[in-house]
Image (spheres, helix red, strand yellow):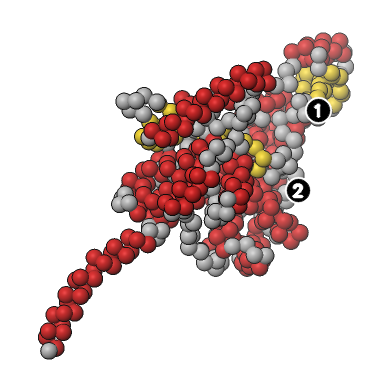
Amino acid sequence: MIAGHLREKNGYYHIILNWKDGDGKRRSKSISTGLPVKGNKKKAEAMLLEARKTFKPEDIASGKNTPYHVFLDRWLKDKMNDFDEETYAVYSHNARVFIGPYFKSLNLQLHEIRTSTLEAYYNHEKTKNHASKKTILQIHEIITLSLNYAIELGWIESNPAKGINPATDEVSVLFVDFLLEWLEMMRTRVRETTYASYNSGIRQSIIPYFMDKKLTLTDIEENPKYLQDFYQHELSKGLSPNSVLRRHANIRKALQHAFHLGLIKSNPADRIERPKKQDYTASYYTDEELAKLFKAAKGDPLELPIVLAAYYGLRRSEIIGLRWDAIDFNPDDPKITIQFTVTEVNFGDGQGNVIIEKEGTKSKASKRTLPLVKPIADLLLQKKKDIENNRRLCGSCYNDKYLDFVHVNEIGERMKPNYISQHFALLLEKHGLKKIRFHDLRHSCASLLYANGVSLKQIQEWLGHSDISTTANIYTHLDYNSKIATANAILPVLFDQQESTDELER
């Protein structure tokens, strides 16, 4: 049973419940009984006992998802007896006429309320409704008290309204605080791998640089040079222009959100000079080099992943995510379907690398079905036999969790993405082969297809690119032989013209 006791407040009994959550943190919840203290102790004690019996801590998880405008109504009802009639009337009017409709239009849940959200709302009341400072302060008081109640219920952990001075004309949100709020918002709006990329750039680079500068959004808006100085600082550390451009993209996107909220009047990231993007040149193996690699990888744990990457151009995440149900060995129509991915990311929260499984690929175009050629079918069938033998030999020690996956080791553990990259580098070094990344096998596949007359559209579909411009930008420069062929095609025309010119001159 949940622990609890009664507390007297403003002449009324309140139930205080206490418990520890799954992380061992002590939580509490305050419930107004509506009973005056005088003459109602036994009734209040009975209500306390009932609350201790029926309260479920999991209600907290659903509570934080309550729309804020709905929560305001609950707060007014639960706290009705805590205020005198005049104060309650003012709170009720402002909540239902001003605050509630605004947040209902945004459809924001309680846990989504941020300092920047409130700043934007106060700016809205000032500019759109021409609210007086007195009205703004009353609204701020209501929001602060209601969010304090959400903390009492255990639905949120901190009050974003604290520390704001809504009576001033300036936005007081620190740039760093806003970036962190934006980052948290993006967690639920983008793919986990995309969020991990945002998180890494912001927490490891942008936040450390701006943390001690104490710059507000207004400071950044009025002085874009602060951003320019940051980009120059990153370049001076040896970071590539393309990496700095990714930092810029994060900052610009966050500031664009601030602009849409009305926290700034323009996006300062649009008023600076960005580093010039470096053209990407993909590394690749020739067919002779691939032949040497296949020979070196014979019998190695990476033999099958290497073949799949070089022949089908599969991404590392697609190789690790390959499952047996995606492979059709039907001799009349053998095929392999790329439809599941496994990635390894780090969210920068101190928990280390996290494995993410996803029913789906990088893009819609990445989900593709390809013909299963006999040499690769033979390798897959041999892999299936090896797994069966290992299961029989290991018995109960074998890990049955990943039976659906192709790439597992001798005891059934699924191959990790980072293992592929690290082991591949060691394999190349051991056999004295040219150093490339594992992902460059995908480039090698594309360059060989192009060199053998396969069109860009076909290469796009084979590799699973969503846009043919991606295929063109990365791979068309790889095949020097095609340039020689082009030169030879033009040469006779120019040569004939030159002969005609010489005849005329003679």
Q: CA distance from mark 1 to mark 2?
A: 29 Å
501 relative position to 57: left or right: left
- Label 1: how many Cα within 10 Å (few below 14, some 14–19, many 20+): few
Instruction: Determine the secondary structure under disc 1.
Output: loop
Q: Which residue is mark 1?
A: 24
Q: Nearer the viewer, residue 365 or 425?
A: 425
Quadrant into which the C terminus falls: bottom left
Q: Nearer the viewer, residue 212 or 420?
A: 420
Residue 163 is marked as: 2
Instruction: Determine the secondary structure under disc 2.
Output: loop
Q: Is residue 312 positioned above or below 412 on the image? A: below
Quadrant into which the N terminus falls: top right
**Residue at (24, 65) in percent of width and height:** 489
Q: Nearer the viewer, residue 111 or 472?
A: 472
**Residue at (55, 37) in percent of width and height:** 299
332 relative position to 500: left or right: right
Q: Which mark sits nearer the N-terminus, 1 or 2?
A: 1
Percent position of residue 502, x then y: 16, 84
- Label 2: how many Cα within 10 Å (few below 14, some 14–19, many 20+): few
Type of residue at label 1? Gly
Q: From where the camera sits, is residue 157 visible?
A: yes
Type of residue at label 2? Gly
Q: From where the camera sits, is residue 269 visible?
A: no
Percent position of residue 366, x then y: 43, 40
**Residue at (38, 58) in percent of width and height:** 479
Q: Is residue 220 positioned above or below 30 on the image? A: below
Q: Is residue 265 positioned above or below 193 on the image? A: below
Percent position of residue 93, x then y: 64, 35
Residue 453 is marked as: none
Percent position of residue 315, x then y: 49, 43
